[in-house]
Amino acid sequence: MPSTQKIYTLFKKDLLLEIRQQYTFYGILLYIASTIFVLYLAMGRPEASAWNGLFWMNLLFICINAVAKSFLQESRGRMLYYYSIAGALDFILAKLMYNLLLMLVMSLLSLLLFSFFLGAPFAKTISFLGITCLGGISISLVFTLLAAIAARANQNAALMAILGFPLIIPQLLLLVKISKSAFGEIFNTGALSQMILLLCGLDLMVVILSLILFPFLWKD
């Protein structure tokens, strides 16, 4: 059974490392700012549908850069140390929580910079803010699982791209569709609720898969 104290300790360790090193955070922030600025120079202020698509693609690449390194940076010696002090469920839950928090911050920063440089064509600001947080959580959960698998497969980052494509595409399509409601597109209330529930169901499935599969990787 997972231990709350161990999960918190591992989560705190990742958070303190991020605060102390900082170069990772600022590197990703530079990536976000430069990407959005180039989009602004190339496209100015695009129409709502293009803005929406660019925003979610930008979040996808941010997540690959931000979340993947959380497992890929762990050395074999450090993993052996974790193995001696914590269980598989403690470790994966701490990573899921840390990456979720990291992607929430990155998602909000990306939304702020997108709105500043490319405008804010959405009609419902609060709704889009909530969808952005939900999307950041969804993408981070998927890539945390993929990064865990890739890290145990001899640090093969290419495996993330191979496994990630069929998993992330349905989520991105759902996020693009749901976010259209914040741009003024009319949806049936039931249909919109069903899409949000489906997205939450996919997130829950990823968490359950992580809890089931990671203990087998942990034993290696």
Image (cartoon, rainbow, N blue to C red):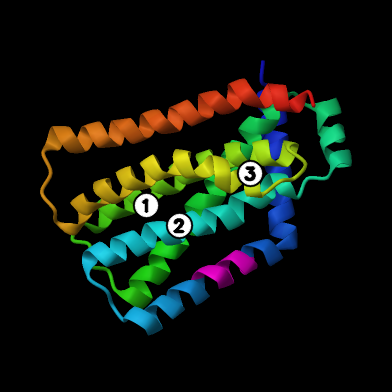
Q: Which residues are magenta?
A: 26-32
Q: State if disc 1 and disc 3 touch (CB < 8 Å).
A: no
N-term-proximal mark, 1 vs 2? 2
Is label 3 in a helix, a strand or a loop? helix
Residue 123 vs 117, above or below: the answer is above
Q: Is residue 175 left or right of residue 155?
A: left
Question: Residue at label 3?
Answer: 159
Residue drawn 66% across and 20% down?
2
Question: Residue at label 2?
Answer: 59
Residue drawn 85% across and 40% down?
76
Label 2, label 3: how far apart the Cα atoms are: 20 Å
Which amino acid type is marked by label 3? Leu
Residue 132's tag is 1
Residue drawn 27% across and 69% down?
120
Label 3, label 1: how far apart the Cα atoms are: 27 Å
Residue 23's tag is none
Is label 1 in a helix, a strand or a loop? helix
Classed neighbour count for the residue bearing mark 1: other residues with Cα under 10 Å, few (<14), some (14–19), many (≥20): many
